[in-house]
């Protein structure tokens, strides 16, 4: 670059490889985004993914334009500029937020946001159940490090003690304590497992649903996660019509009429797809495809905006389509 040093704006960055093939983390000023690099992309740039193990440098902006200055000799500046241009003009890879699974709640929605080790939760103090629970699931999290044995349901320590739902509130109610983020998705870490049993992560769920069709969907998610990272959001559906049902002796807990779950995958591979499910909070034994919905339909019912940090064109496309055959 020919610009004078005094005219330059220097943006330091790091580009480091992830445990997932072709996935790199771009970081600057404490912020990070994930970038997808396929072997196809690297071949066009005449470099290998192994050469990109880690890179530090600076993006330089000045009167003469912009460029990229490497702090080591892993790659030449020319190749780096080509790489950035490739991301800008193609859809082979794109940046994403680390919180892509977090939905946008409707304005005025009462919620307390809790960030746990394995999930993020929006809790409603009026209904004493979550509005939604969101988490990521991949192959690494399916490696069992801790057993479910010895972990018990417990009040959430972030809720005032006299207002926190306790497990006894579900006693003799006819409903199970249904996990939203499952304990089975939390076996990779002791703290994650313990937090999955917080009562803020629980909803009153029909026993047949909790141990049947809903459980089968949780198992399906674990199979799908073996193929790539999942971004999952689930929660209760509360219908406005009719008289709401409550359980609980000490604390009133709203019984949902139904539950939703939405799932996004393929982001790291540059081939995103998504699917939604809606289950009535009743007994049933039906095949998985009887619960399938588009993300758009789930959004209309719940008032939530899912996966809003995807580029608009991609978000609109994946939220309209739903084909369970692509997931089996």
Image: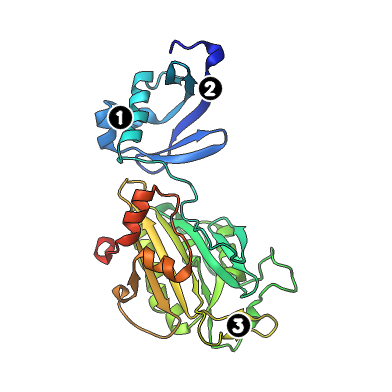
Colour treatment of the image: rainbow
Residue 166: x, y in percent? 66, 76
Observer-nearest of 116 and 300: 300
Question: Is disc 2 placed on a helix, strand or loop?
Answer: strand
Residue lying at 44% horizontally and 10% vertically, measured from the top left:
2
Upstream in sequence: badge 3 or badge 1: 1
Find disc 1 in the rendering and name its residue: 48
Circle 3 Cα neighbour tier, 10 Å, few/some/many (<14 / 14–19 / ≥20): many
Q: Position of residue 255 (x, y in %)?
A: 55, 81
Q: Nearer the viewer, residue 310 or 170?
A: 310
Q: Say whether marks 2 and 1 touch (CB < 8 Å).
A: no
Is residue 273 toward the left or the right of residue 165 in the image?
left
Q: Which residue is mark 3?
A: 170
Asked where in the image residue 89 lies, by quadrant, the reply is: top left
Q: Is residue 182 left or right of residue 277?
A: right
| Rendered position, 247 above or below 98 | below
- Above or below — where is 107 with respect to 250? above
| Residue lying at 38% horizontally and 57% vertically, measured from the top left | 264
Q: Which mark is residue 10?
A: 2
């Amino acid at each position: 670059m020919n610009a004078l040093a005094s005219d330059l704006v220097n943006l330091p960055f790091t580009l480091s490889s992830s445990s997932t093939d072709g996935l790199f983390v771009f970081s600057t000023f404490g912020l990070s985004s994930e970038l997808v690099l396929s072997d196809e992309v690297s071949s066009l740039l005449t470099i290998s993914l192994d050469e990109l193990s880690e890179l530090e440098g600076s993006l330089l902006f000045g009167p003469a334009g912009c460029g990229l200055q490497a702090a080591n000799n892993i790659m030449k500046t020319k190749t780096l500029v080509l790489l950035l241009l490739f991301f800008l003009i193609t859809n082979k890879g794109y940046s994403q937020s680390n919180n892509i699974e977090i939905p946008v709640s409707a304005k005025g929605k009462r919620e307390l946001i809790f960030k746990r080790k394995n999930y993020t939760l929006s809790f409603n103090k009026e209904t004493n159940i979550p509005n939604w629970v969101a988490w990521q699931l991949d192959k690494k999290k399916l490696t069992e490090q801790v057993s479910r044995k010895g972990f018990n349901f417990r009040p959430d320590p972030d809720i005032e003690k006299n207002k926190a739902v306790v497990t006894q509130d579900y006693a003799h109610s006819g409903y199970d304590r249904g996990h939203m983020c499952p304990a089975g998705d939390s076996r990779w870490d002791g703290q994650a497992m313990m937090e999955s049993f917080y009562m803020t992560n629980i909803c009153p769920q029909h026993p047949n649903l909790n141990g049947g069709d809903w459980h089968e969907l949780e198992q399906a998610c674990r199979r799908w996660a073996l193929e790539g990272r999942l971004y999952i959001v689930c929660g209760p559906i509360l219908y406005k019509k009719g008289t709401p049902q409550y359980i609980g002796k000490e604390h009133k807990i709203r019984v949902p009429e139904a539950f939703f779950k939405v799932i996004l995958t393929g982001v790291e591979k540059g081939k995103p797809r998504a699917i939604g499910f809606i289950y009535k909070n009743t007994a049933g034994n039906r095949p998985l495809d009887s619960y399938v919905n588009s993300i758009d339909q789930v959004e209309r019912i719940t008032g939530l905006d899912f996966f809003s940090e995807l580029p608009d064109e991609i978000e609109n496309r994946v939220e309209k389509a739903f084909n369970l055959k692509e997931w089996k």
